[in-house]
Amino acid sequence: MALVIAIDGPAAAGKGTLARKLARHYGLPHLDTGLTYRATAKALLDEGKPLDDEAVAAEMAARVDLGHLDRSVLSAHEIGEAASKVAAMPAVRVALVDAQRRFAASGKGAVLDGRDIGTVVCPDAPVKLYVTADAEIRARRRYDEITAKGEEADFSQILEDVRRRDERDMGRKDSPLRPADDAHLLDTSKMGIEAAFQAALTFVDKRL
Ligand code: C5P
């Protein structure tokens, strides 16, 4: 069976870094599915299109090219906010999930990270991880990331954003963020990335 590693969790829990490290370790391609929602949102923003027109958003989603997703042009806070709005639209999800499934099935395996990989995109993945951490700790990581670049940041604003994004992602009707029943939970609140990586490796190796 293809080694598909499904990684889900809320924003800033460390799942992206973990996914990249696991992909490198096992020599598998990696897809950060959040970027597909971000690319859809950015296309709408760039073209001055409304964020609440599902048909228009779905059209944009269908045009997203998985080969050209660049986090450096998609990382802006406003794009993340807009992404979580368009991600609540079923027609957008149909288009993007279809592309994500094709990516997962295209080789000897893949690592995908997002919000609904273990529950919807790849429910049969042999390895599922749900990576989480306390909201305060995730907000602190975001804050440190921004201030490390020499930029200004407001911790309480970031914490509010993290909580609002969690609520939107967990509360939506279509594919809400939740751990799959068979997911392995990894709480990184008190773990550095290296410890989280080692814990994930131990878990994945047992499934091979
Ligand atoms: O992970 P990232 O912050 O890049 O994701 C942006 C938004 O895209 C999330 O807040 C979420 O609403 C949406 N998303 C999703 N399903 C995924 C990945 C991301 O709904 N598999």
Image (spheres, rainbow, N blue to C red):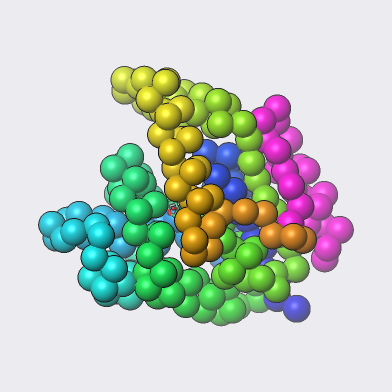
132 is higher (above) or lower (below) than 48? above
Picture quadrant of residue 132? top right
Residue 178, horizontal then vertical, whole percent: 62, 53
Give whichever of 145, 171 is nearer the camera. Answer: 171
Instruction: Work out which quarter of the rendered image holds the N terminus and state it.
Output: bottom right
User: Residue visible at 74% across and 47% down?
Assistant: 185
Report if residue 120 is visible in the image. yes
* Residue 204: in magenta span: yes
Report if residue 31 is visible in the image. no
Residue 123, horizontal then vertical, whole percent: 66, 71
Instruction: Work out which quarter of the rendered image holds the C terminus and state it.
Output: bottom right
Picture quadrant of residue 58? bottom left
Count of residue discs: 0
26 is higher (above) or lower (below) than 151? below
Looking at this view, name the residue that lies furthest to the left.
Answer: 48
198 is higher (above) or lower (below) than 109? above
Looking at this view, name the residue that lies furthest to the right.
Answer: 206
Q: Which residues are magenta?
A: 183-208
Residue 44, horizontal then vertical, whole percent: 22, 60
User: Residue visible at 72% across and 43% down?
Assistant: 186
In the displayed structure, does residue 170 sit left or right of residue 190? Answer: left
In the displayed structure, does residue 11 sit left or right of residue 193? Answer: left
User: Residue visible at 49% across and 28% down?
Assistant: 139
* Residue 80: in magenta span: no
Picture quadrant of residue 28? bottom right
Residue 137, horizontal then vertical, whole percent: 58, 27
User: Residue visible at 34% across and 45% down?
Assistant: 81
